[in-house]
């Protein structure tokens, strides 16, 4: 078990395009995933991308169990997604509040596609192909953006909708994700 440091906005490694994984059987991949799970759990995150711990590979993990921090949020299955391909299923966009472990203490209102299909591989190389909507779709878009060097503040349309979590949402005790 290893909880890794999460890189914070300003670190150039968060702005790089990550490389595809080619070897699904490697010990290195399994160790990376274990570290990502440990780190996400330690930070109470909803998702984590490998570049956030300084590993420039196209690997994300995400998942939301029933959680009092997001009382209105749907449950998202715990997922390992490697070499993802995202395809929006409609032009419809929706704004929603996001946070990020790499942008601690902040929240921003971010437009995302409401419906999308995502394809990729799991940790064993098996195909994943899901069509999702709402919060699940938002989480996937946020995490996969990290693989292209995009942090959510870059997608905020109106910077007045960006601020400190405890100021925007007093009393809610939001942690970073
Ligand atoms: Ni993030």
Image (spheres, grey):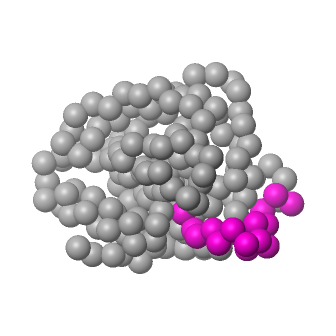
State the quadrant of the N terminus.
Answer: bottom left
Q: Is residue 96 above or below residue 119?
A: below
Question: x, y percentage for residue 112?
Answer: 66, 40
Residue range (magenta)? 160-177
Q: Is residue 69 visible?
A: yes
Name the residue located 57 percent from the left edge and 68 percent from the top edge: 176
Q: Quadrant of residue 79?
A: top left
Q: Is residue 109 above or below residue 40?
A: above
Report the residue that reaches farthest toward the top: 90
Q: Is residue 54 visible?
A: no
Query: Considering depth in this image, is 57 or 171 the residue closer to the camera?
Result: 171
Question: x, y percentage for residue 146?
Answer: 51, 54
Name the residue located 21 percent from the left edge and 38 percent from the top edge: 125
Query: Considering depth in this image, is 174 or 52 the residue closer to the camera?
Result: 174
Residue 37 part of the magenta segment: no
Is residue 24 left or right of 101 when viewed as pictured?
A: left
State the quadrant of the C terminus.
Answer: bottom right
Name the residue located 32 percent from the left edge and 68 percent from the top edge: 38
Q: How many marks?
A: 0
Name the residue located 70 percent from the left edge and 53 percent from the top edge: 97
Q: Is residue 138 above or below residue 48?
A: above
Query: Considering depth in this image, is 139 or 41 the residue closer to the camera?
Result: 41
Question: x, y percentage for residue 100?
Answer: 57, 63
Is residue 93 left or right of 77 when viewed as pictured?
A: right
């Amino acid at each position: 078990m290893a909880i890794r440091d999460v890189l914070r906005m300003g670190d150039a490694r968060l702005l790089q395009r990550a490389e595809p994984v080619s070897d699904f059987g490697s010990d290195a991949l399994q160790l990376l995933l274990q570290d990502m799970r440990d780190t996400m759990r330690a930070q109470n995150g909803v998702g984590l991308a490998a570049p956030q711990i300084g590993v420039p590979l196209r690997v994300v993990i995400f998942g939301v169990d029933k959680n009092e921090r997001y009382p209105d949020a749907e449950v998202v299955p715990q997922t390992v997604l490697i070499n993802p391909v995202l395809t929006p299923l409609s032009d419809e966009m929706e704004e929603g509040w996001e946070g990020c472990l790499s942008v601690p203490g902040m929240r921003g209102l971010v437009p995302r596609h409401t419906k999308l299909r995502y394809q990729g591989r799991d940790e064993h190389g098996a195909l994943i192909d899901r069509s999702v909507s709402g919060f699940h779709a938002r989480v996937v878009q946020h995490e996969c953006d990290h693989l292209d060097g995009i942090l959510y503040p870059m997608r905020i349309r109106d910077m007045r909708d960006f601020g400190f979590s405890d100021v925007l949402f007093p009393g809610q005790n939001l942690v970073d994700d």
